[in-house]
Image (cartoon, rainbow, N blue to C red):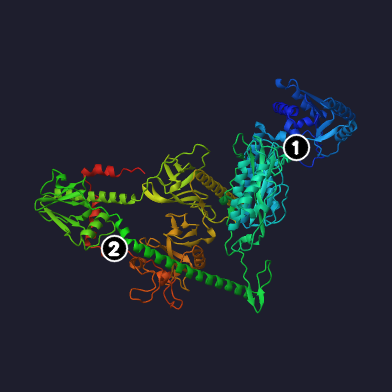
Amino acid sequence: MAIDAGLFWRRLSQLQTCFKSEGHWRKVDAISILALDRSDETSFNKSSACFLHLFGRELPGSLLIMVEDTMHIAASCTKCANLEDLLHRKPPSMENFTVVIHRISMHSDVEIVCKHLIDVIRQSRGGTRLGCLTKMQHSSNLSDSWNANLLKAGIDKVDVTSLLGMHMSTNDDYAQLCVRRAATVTHKVLKHGTIRLVEDAFDEARPVTHEELAAKAEDFCENPSKINLKIPPGPLESCYFPIIQSGGDYDLRPSASTNERFLSDDVVVVSLGARYKSYCANMARTLFIDPVPQIQNTYSVLLDLRRRCLDVMRAGFQLRCVAEAARSFISEKHPNLLGCLPKSLGFGLGLDFREAALILNSKNPNLFAPNMVFSLSVGFHNIPLAPAEKAAARGSVRKLSKYSILIADTVMIQGGSETPEVLTKHSVDWCDVSYFINDSSDGQRIVLESDGASVQSVAHGTARSSRLRDRKRGFQEETTCGNRKARQAELMQQKIVSKREEAQHIHNGHQRASSMLSKVPEIEAYISTREYPNDIPSNEIYVDVEAQSIFVPVNGVPIPFHISMIKNTVQPDPDRNSTYLRLNFFAPGQPLGKDVVPTTTSVIEEHGHSSIFVKEMLYRSHESRRLTAAYRMIQELRKRFRQHAAKAAEEADLVAQEKLVKMRDQRIPRMSDLTMRPFISGKKTTGTLEAHTNGLRFISKKHETVDLMYENIKHSLFQPCENEVMVLIHFHLKHPVIIGRKKTHDVQFFTEVVDASVALESGKSAMYDPDEIDEEQRERHLRKKLNDIFKEFCKKVERVSKHYQHKLEFDIPYRDLGFHGVPHREMVLIQPTVHCLVNLTETPFFIVELDHVEHVHFERCTLRATNFDMVIILKNLELAPISINAIPMGELDGIQEWLTDCTLTYTAGQASMAWKSLMNLVRNDDRFYEEYDETGQPKPAGWCFLQADDGEDEEMSDGDEDYHIEEDDEDDSDEDDDEDDDESEEDNDDHEDVADWESMDAESDEQPPA
């Protein structure tokens, strides 16, 4: 590899300038740097760094002597041949500087060259002091002869290790580029390699040693293509063997080593560094598995300390200011952690991994300079963890008596008064370094006392009788069930008390609240008779489309009726001479039906007791054409009015969304080839999802766009693909949006791993068919790849939203807490999340927010039943309860345990309830949460009346054969005969049309802007 002549002469000029002008270099008359032989080299050292700094290679077995205007290089003939090319490419600025090359081929040449170089040193300045790397001790023909000649000549050696380190610490453009690339590799290896290895080990519950993880991390540093990292070609290696520590045994020094212990699920410290073209970068992170609050509080202190240290790392400040600022901050804010603070908080980085002259301790008077690179390592060592602080801990954290925390980053000093730039940009947020993987019951040991002897579970297969195992299992289930019942009784009592206080508060403010209620506007087609149309015939039915009214003649006087008051129109069979038309109106005393607009209902409720309503009108005409035309126009107007009323009701709760602001100051996170549900148009909508400043934008392949604002997203969910056919991200919105002419609260983006429907062959394939095995392996790899892509996209979206002061965090459903049930039409897997109970794979989506749940009741819970029903009662009692049917009986205990952990109350009964009637009683009962009724008789308070008594007879019908769903639609049976007439006339409308309404059809079919 050829030596970069431009870089060599530029750096040589800088070294000559320092040697001739700076005061520290005036203490020596010449500089001598002896490169170690490759066979003697045990590690990277300062002499290697010096030769790499000048020549870009180490040149082992060479000697460099530098005086004010000349540099002498003694090397083998092969190395000299490469160096001679530098002499022909000398820049004009270095004309007064001479480079002399001495060839060494035999032992006699070594003596001659050494004596000549001694004479050169004597002629430079005083000629008695030689700057050397005195700590470098090695033996070779050249080094032995050189040291003997120096001793014979009486030249004193002066250590210039720190001076050379300070000189090389100020990086030029080439060095900055190499350091940035080394930092990028270090960050990517930690993020996509090492941390994922740790996460996979915990996810798969697979034992792995620290050394095994470190070996794989080192392999990633040297072969980054294994983590799909494409970097420019160049020498790449690990700075040191990565350090991974857990289990309470920690060493935060950079010289620490990785032990062979197994990875423990408590506090994991990961440190690694990469070297690109010999330039180093370093970083470290601490991962917390099931941490207790005390550990989280300590980590927040460490983040504050890190910000304080970065604030004083400015050009012109002394290096000791970092340690002094750290000690001052801890002494003032958290003195209990002062003894855990390391004496050194980092070191300089460059060609040498740890620059001794740039240690960040309280005794270093050197100054920060622009373009210097440091490894800032802040941490606390051996923090005590008291038993009281880990009383509620889960997993291996309970075994810790002390722990350590470390955060290390590669930073570059900026010019002026700016704070340093962090080159290793891996997140240090608590949500990105903390994991919660163990249940509260995991790892608990049950101790049985019997005749003074304790029986405990043994870790490694001690022979125990089945009777003892059954006894332990029964005891554990009984204990858990008893604790759950006691906790439920406590929760129920708390709910009753809170509801009583809430009812009292509502009663006190009832009058003020009722006065603020908005009234439904009354029907007002015309303000006065002057607004009537001018061409109204006196003895004909006239339809005013603009005012949505119908004028009917009464004794020759046209009387207007708004279309909302007409229940239906019927055209009976004509007789021999006449045609008839009957108008049926809404009136008090008859069921109104479900499709009645609120204005009609309010008019009847308000004026039904004090006004006279017309119920029916019958008109006869000898000319059938006019009545038939009026009939069709009335029907069409009713149809249009119902459509507009339904659309207005649907869009009533729509909220105007802010305009999307595209992100232009950084790379846009995007994910392509996604399918969106609900579909915008057609049978499938695919496209690209992008994250911007204030929201997400989906662009379909047909260039249709859907914008989701961060502020409108209530819950964001990421469901990886395990046993499902898709991996997805789901957004539950605060306010609905219009997609494809329909209002929706939920928007989902997914990618199918395999087709939902797979064509199966005849089933004659062999069990160990290689093609099928390869297909399964490809499918597993595809699942893992897609899960990683979606997970990485979710993290990018979180970072973007946080950067622009929005709060968006993705939640992953707890698959191990899931259960099967029928919320809609088919059996699905329902999984809880932190805030919801969801099924996201099948449509319609099933999402219940836990904050909206008032109570949960289990129906058909009997000893002989194979499944049961779960009824979710919402806090808004006006809404119908949500039912999940046909849940397997084996899931009952798990669901009840989860509800108890979520502080939700539940009851269980044997019968199926008529919930519509029951909720009417609950809403109208002012003393529902009281323990006594109006007569003073005791009664169950709140939802306790749903709980079946223990002594209740269980000879009720149960099982699948008696399973049925209660039908509560009682209004349908109360409809009168006019409804049948309405249906018949609606059928007739499908086959008839009027040319006058074709323009209205075209207008109504236009899609309103979403």
- Label 1: which residue? 162
**Residue sitting nearer the eye, 791 or 920:** 920
Residue placed farthest to the left in the image? 555
- Indicate whether 831 appears above or below 659: below
Which amino acid, mark 2? Asp
Q: In the visual, does 964 lie left or right of 138?
A: left
Residue placed farthest to the bottom in the image? 451
Which amino acid, mark 1? Ser
Q: In the visual, does 128 lie left or right of 471?
A: right
Quarter of the picture holding the C terminus: top left
- Indicate whether 754 appears above or below 321: below
Q: Secondary structure at mark 2?
A: helix
Quarter of the picture holding the N terminus: top right
Place of residue 701 in the rendered image (x, y in percent of width and height, measured from the top left): 45, 40
Q: Residue at position x 48%, y 59% from top?
A: 830
First along the sequence among labels 2 and 1: 1
Mark 1: few, some, or many residues within 10 Å (few <14, many ≥20)? some
Place of residue 434 in the rendered image (x, y in percent of width and height, measured from the top left): 58, 53
**Residue sitting nearer the eye, 662 or 869:** 662
Q: Residue at position x 21%, y 55% from top?
A: 565
Q: Secondary structure at mark 1?
A: helix
Q: Residue at position x 85%, y 35% from top?
A: 143
Q: What number is the disc on residue 972? A: 2
